[in-house]
Image (spheres, rainbow, N blue to C red):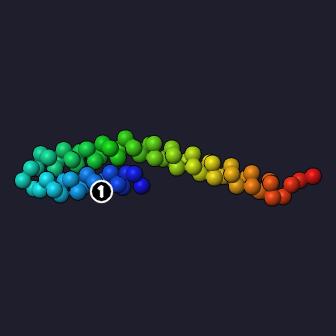
Amino acid sequence: MLSALILHLLLTLAAHLGGADMAGVLAVALGMVAVLLVLLPFALLCVRRAQDALAAGSERRGRAASPQG
């Protein structure tokens, strides 16, 4: 979600620069790629940790709902 927001903001900035400043548009495009590449591993790590937390929470609820004994 954060990557999409950053991408949107950078594309809006590139649209405001216009075609006259081609070096600026290229710099913004390279900036977009760099930001997305830097944030991608952290986003994937957060997703994996969230899935692990959800799985652990559902296991605990399952054990609490049906006590063995």
In the depicted structure, whether residue 38 falls above or below residue 17 = above
Quadrant of the rendered image containing residue 66: bottom right
- Identified at 32% across, 51% down, the residue is 6
Element carrying mark 1: helix
Q: Is residue 66 left or right of residue 30?
A: right
Q: Is residue 13 left or right of residue 65?
A: left
- Identified at 75% across, 55% down, the residue is 61
Please name the amino acid that badge 1 sits on: His
Residue 43, how many percent across, how many down? 46, 47
- Identified at 48% across, 47% down, the residue is 44
Residue 57, how many percent across, how many down? 69, 51
In the depicted structure, whether residue 39 falls above or below residue 61 = above
Residue 58, how many percent across, how many down? 70, 55
Residue farthest toward the left in the current orientation of the protein: 20
- Identified at 52% across, 49% down, the residue is 47
Q: Nearer the viewer, residue 24 or 61?
A: 61
Residue denoted by label 1:
8
Residue 35, how many percent across, how many down? 32, 44
Quadrant of the rendered image containing residue 1: bottom left
Q: Is residue 38 left or right of residue 28?
A: right
Q: Residues within 10 Å of mark 1 (few under 14, many from 20)?
A: few
